Amino acid sequence: MAEALVVRNLSKRFGGLRAVQNLSFSINEGETVALIGPNGAGKTTSFHLITGFHRPDEGSVTAFGREIVGLRPHDICAHGLARTFQVARPFGGMTVLANVMTGAFLRDKRPEVACAKAYEAIEFVGLSAKAHTPARDLTTIDQRRLEMARALATEPRLLLLDEVMAGLNPSEIDQAVALVGKLSKRGLTIIIVEHVMRAIMAVARHIVVLDHGQKIAEGGPKEIVKNQEVVRAYLGSGYVHVATAGET
Amino acid sequence: MQRLCSPAFIGLAALAGVLIVLPLVVTSHFAIDICIRILLFAFIGVAWNLMGGYAKQLSLGHAAYFGLGAYTSTIMQIKFGISPWIGMLAGGVVAMLASLPIGAVCFRLRGPYFAIATIATAQVLMLLFLKFRDFAWGAEGTTIPNLGNTPLMMQFEAKAPYYYIALAMLALGLAITYRIERSWMGFYLVAIGEDEDAAEAVGVNAPQVKRNIYMISAFLTALAGTFYVQYIYFIDPNTAFNFNISVEAALVSIVGGIGTLWGPVIGTVLLEVTSALLQSWLGSGLGGVQLTVYSLILISVILWRPTGLLGVFTDAYKWIVRAPPAREAAIDG
């Protein structure tokens, strides 16, 4: 299978803090990969480095065969990498529809085409009933849905989801997990940063674990939960793993 | 056909009709002068609003483009005898070109820092025109030679033609705003105003979009500059690059409703009328009292309606149209 994303020796320092050190991993097309680790491990920084919001000190990122380090975020988006933010950042004053249309304009500047594509994306994430609601009036999960719809409207090949489940209640997490599964079925390659282990086990076939900016483990969900290093650094010794993707 | 019968279209046609007939009915020079001022500042507000309102790039330096437009056409007219009609367009082009380096520097900054940097650009231009006497008459300025009634040189005996020019400019500004608001560019501008990083993340080339809208805004503002000096037959750096022009452009939009099509128009009508009425009622009394009252009105508008007065009208409309169900809901609750 072709590689969607190859990250090689990526490093970023903020003053004395080494946020990301020598990070390397790769993702095949159509795969869903989770990036996990304790707070401050460098997950979100890695997202910023891949999507062009920060410039790495060293290393390279190749997406669909093209080096993307040094490109501006909008160029990277045009190349097919769409992201969401850790804290949802909808355009508050705009309606849900206008938010998503803004994303859709990337591929087609005609308003009627963008509008049709936006409705499609809104329906896909299940926000149709609120298409004309101002984005700032949405609940947390609906804001996350909106961010996903807005990212989808840019017609990405690779989707980077940054903690889309944070702050959701258990039933909402189930909905979000179902949505990520639906995206994956559509053929999208997905990288997901997440703390909710239950969700990760349900969606990811491959997990990369970060700690202090370094990769400490990588592998399938079942190997990861048994990995001593991961248990020590992140999961905690009391962790009992629930059903993994392979078993459900 | 359906579009022609819509209430919005009928309202707009009625408004246009009234505005076109107005100078035929109103003969007072004072009243017509106020109308021209309103149309001119509404137009400057509309030009400012494209960038300052929709994309929330709060420029306080639009006097730079007003002044460049005014000086370009005046220099072309006095030194080369070229009609201000051509000078007006040339001034617009000069302003557009000037907005490129100014934007390149100022757009590196965001929020209040951007506003301060834009103030500086207008001040620097004013100082340049004050210092370089050989080039553009320095601090004394110059009067524009009165050629009598020569429409080709944008000079008229009556006030009505000036009124119609200002009206046409405002109509142009509103038409451009209307088109942009409904296109991808309008969405991109609002997205940048809301959250520039999030806009970049969905593929918006924010620096390019800001540069383009700044050019359009500068071009339109320069047209107003040419018109203004032709109207008052005089130019000096302090008139052309006056800080008040920058403030007024922002103020009418903020008071009327930032980032809306009609906001700057409503803001200008209210501010100019209030200011003119206060001037005539209180101007002869205690010195400065009309300015104090004006400021108090301004403060209360900002406190009471921070999103602009246009909201009052839309709320009133909604209240009238939807009042009965709202009351029922209140009783049910």
Image (cartoon, coloured by chain):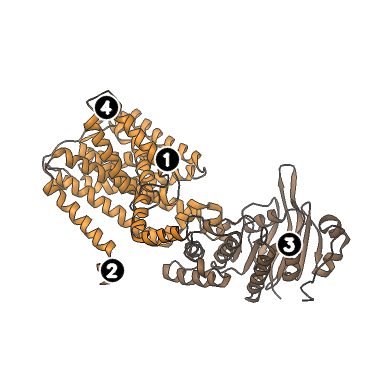
**Disc 2 versus disc 1: nearer the observer:** 1
Q: Badge 3: how crowded within 10 Å, few (<14), some, or many (20+)?
A: some
Callout count: 4
Looking at the figure, which quarter contains the N terminus of chain B?
bottom left
Instruction: Report the chain shown in orange.
Output: B
Q: Check chain identity for marks 4 and 3: say if they share one.
A: no
**Mark 1, secondary structure of its residue:** helix
> Residue drawn at (68%, 62%), measured in percent from left and top?
A169
Q: Chain of mark 3?
A: A
Q: CA distance from mark 4 to mark 1?
A: 41 Å
**Mark 4, secondary structure of its residue:** helix
Q: Which mark is residue B140?
A: 4
Q: CA distance from mark 2 to mark 3?
A: 53 Å
Q: Chain of mark 1?
A: B
Q: Badge 4: how crowded within 10 Å, few (<14), some, or many (20+)?
A: few
Instruction: Report the chain shown in brown.
Output: A
Residue A197: percent from left, percent from top:
76, 63
Q: Amino acid at mark 4?
A: Glu
Residue most extreme to the top: B286
Q: Which mark is residue B3?
A: 2
Whether residue B242 is visible to the viewer of this picture, yes or no, is no
Q: Which residue is mark 3?
A: A196
> Residue drawn at (24%, 36%), measured in percent from left and top?
B276
Residue most extreme to the front: B331
